């Protein structure tokens, strides 16, 4: 049985094009556990496509977003 630490934080960089399509996803800071890393990436992929950029954002073609997933025993969260 694998033991997990009390708290792990993983950071993912996701990139969207102006239509809201997920065009890139990368792990910037691994949790150290493949299972947790893959689940975090899968949650971002499953949520796609995202809404298109509002017109007020002008000519912005690509948006990079850092997402931090934090894992504690018995719960999880993201910010």
Image: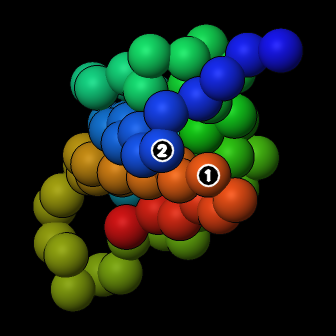
The image quadrant where one finds the N terminus is top right
Location of residue 38 by image quarter: top right
Which color mode does the image show?
A: rainbow
Is disc 1 surrounded by few (<14), some (14 to 19) or many (20+) residues within 10 Å?
Answer: few
**Residue 5, percent across and down?**
49, 33
Q: Quadrant of the C terminus?
A: bottom left
Q: Is 21 drawn above or below residue 18 in the view shown? A: above
| Residue shown at 18% from the left, 58% from the top | 60
Is 27 in front, or is 52? Answer: 27
Q: Decide: marks 2, 1 in contact (CB < 8 A)?
A: yes
Residue that badge 1 annotates? 73
Question: Does residue 32 show up?
Answer: yes
Residue 31 point in image, percent of width and height? 43, 26
Q: Residue at x 70, y 59 (%)?
A: 74
Q: Is residue 17 visible?
A: no
Task: Characterize the local packing of mark 2: few (<14), some (14-19) or many (20 or more) Cα atoms within 10 angstroms.
Answer: few
For the image shown, how many numbered marks are present on the structure?
2
| Residue at disc 2, secondary structure | loop
**Residue tagged 2:** 6
> Residue placed at 35% from the left, 81% from the top?
54
Q: Tell me the CA gap for discs 2 and 1.
A: 6 Å
Side of 34 relative to 52 (left or right): right
Residue at the extreme right of the image, as rendered: 1
Side of 1 relative to 41 (left or right) = right
Extreme-bottom residue of the structure:
56
Direction from residue 74 to residue 33 in the image, left or right: left
For residue 57, which numbered disc appears in the image?
none
Q: Earlier in the sequence, mark 2 or mark 1?
A: 2
Give coordinates of residue 10: x percent, y percent: 38, 37
From the viewer's side, name the closer residue of 57 and 76. 76
């Amino acid at each position: 049985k694998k033991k997990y630490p009390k708290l792990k934080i993983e950071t993912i960089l996701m990139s969207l094009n102006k239509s809201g399509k997920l065009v890139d996803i990368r792990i910037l800071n691994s949790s150290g556990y493949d299972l947790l890393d893959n689940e975090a990436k899968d949650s971002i992929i499953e949520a796609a496509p995202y809404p298109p950029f509002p017109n007020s954002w002008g000519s912005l073609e690509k948006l990079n977003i850092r997402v931090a997933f934090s894992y504690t025993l018995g719960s999880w969260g993201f910010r």
